[in-house]
Amino acid sequence: MEFIRKEVPVGDDSIVETFRSRADAPVLVLLPGSFNDERLWVRTAEYFCRPLDVVVINLQGHGGSRPAMPRSTIEEYTSIVLRALDGLGVDRFFIGGNSIGGMMALEAGRLAPERVRGIAA
């Protein structure tokens, strides 16, 4: 499976690097943990791509997402992910992650309950 890489501007000179399978299906967002990038999920995500449109998002300071935000909160990181999904035209989605990505998945459910269809943290 080939993922399409896209840099999404999210304001304040911030860029979020995303990888998307582009399937015509429900969206599954996967968030890598600390000190990881898309490589954590892209290979695993190939198993989900047939029934789902998989979007892998690199956190600020990881992969091509910039700038780094070493003193940010989970809420701030999650807000950036939600803005990136807006930029991709994703309204409703399932979301999962590990480590900080798992905490952000839970926070997405709190910040945008009308958009989140399910959480795997």
Image: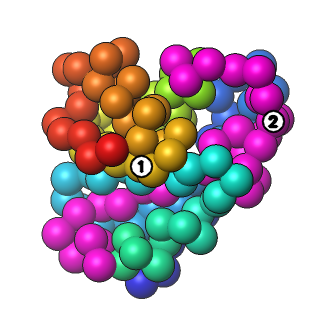
Residue 4 visible in this rendered orientation of the protein: no
Q: Which residues are magenta?
A: 47-75
Residue 88 picture location, percent across and down: 46, 42
Residue drawn at (23%, 20%), measured in percent from left and top? Answer: 113
Q: Which residue is mark 1?
A: 97
Residue drawn at (38%, 36%), measured in percent from left and top? Answer: 105
- Within the magenta stretch, is there residue 58? yes
Q: Please name the colour scheme applied to the rendered image.
A: rainbow
Residue 96 picture location, percent across and down: 35, 47
Q: From mark 2 to mark 1, how far is it between C-alphas?
A: 19 Å
Front in this rendered view, residue 61 or 1 = 61
Residue type marked 2: Ala
Task: Using the image, determine if residue 39 lies above or below residue 116.
Answer: below
Q: Residue placed farthest to the front in the image?
A: 99
Residue 81 picture location, percent across and down: 52, 33
Q: Which residue is mark 2?
A: 68
- Within the magenta stretch, is there residue 107? no
